[in-house]
Amino acid sequence: MILEIKEVFKSFPVKKSFFGKVEKVINALNGISLSIFPKETVGVIGESGCGKSTLGKVILDLERPDKGKVLYKGKEIQTLSKEGYKIYRKNVQAIFQNPQNSLNPRMKIWEIVTEGLKINYDLSQKELEEKAKELLSTVGLSSSYLNRYPHQLSGGQKQRIAIARAIALNPELIVADEPTSALDVSVQAQVVNLLVDIQERQGVSYFFISHSLPVVEAISDRVIVMYKGYIVEEGTSKEVFSDTKHPYTKVLISSVPVPDPIKKRKVLKLPDIDTEETIKTGCPFYPRCPKRNKDCLTYDMKPIEISLTHKVSCLLYT
């Protein structure tokens, strides 16, 4: 096991009074627990604001949890020694959503992809340049790009550079936060194929966050479905997409068009609710759920096992 998350909570103050007193708090993560194993891809889906990106930031230690633990190979990252934490940061890398914002416009491409190498290893200029050529070759770009700047590249090429930077230190886990959302569909397919190819060659694991359900279905070994800071369903890609259990997951999947014009998929619609509406106890999906009942208001959201690999947080399966 590379990483384990145990009962992680994270909240953010969103409204303060004139005197600075916090009047409202958004609970981004509510007791999240999950594990990530070597050479696997864990896909994360859910609507905007469900906590996907916050969970990714907690894994990267860009956000500290209010409660709970993040364990790297059995050790809590907050208690790692200086050397141990350096190893953790080297082995857990990130690919961000918009390469336009994540690549330094003042740095040449070879400097961007070798920045981590310069920090972690004592390499000569020639060794860095050779490594940069190797990294660009890995992501399907020629060495002619080495002395260019980010603004001279297309969106797809920039994302390939972001991937090259992420794999430079040969990490064990990459958190990919919407890595294809800013790209054209044809370029999305190229980037996904590249990520799969890198995983096969280097054995890296992915924590893959995306709004694109077809991409998540294609690339993931396991999938978790999040809603308002909770994991409402978890299983293999086949279980989540073909044997869907949670009412919210069913709504998500029904929104994806079927490519075959002969086949039709019934689109499930949810009632419109006040975005400010919340419930203090029970299932957070209760206000919108088409199958809700009063018992849902006291449900503790503990996952129910459908099979050894498939879990759902819904009273319908008790």
Image: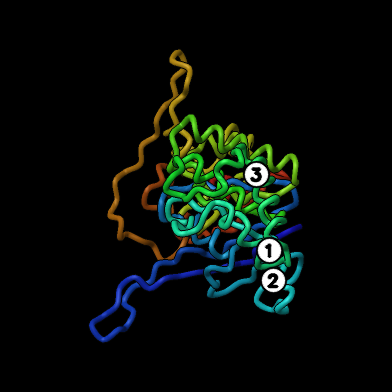
Distance between mark 1 and mark 2 Cα atoms: 6 Å
Residues packed near mark 2 inside 10 Å, few (<14), some (14 to 19) or many (20 plus): few
Q: Quadrant of residue 261?
A: top left
Q: Position of residue 138 (x, y in %)?
A: 67, 41
| Left or right: 195, with 154 as reference point | right
The amino acid marked with disc number 3 is Arg
Which of the 4 image quadrants contains residue 3?
bottom right
**For the N terminus, which image quadrant?**
bottom right
Instruction: Please name the amino acid that badge 1 sits on.
Output: Lys
Tell me the SS state at disc 2.
Answer: helix
Q: Which residue is mark 3?
A: 222
Cα–Cα span, label 2 and label 3: 28 Å
Q: Position of residue 222 (x, y in %)?
A: 65, 44
Across the whole image, how many numbered discs are drawn on residues?
Answer: 3
Residue 4: x percent and y percent?
69, 62
Q: Residues within 10 Å of mark 3 (few under 14, many from 20)?
A: many
Image position of 223 (left or right of 229): right
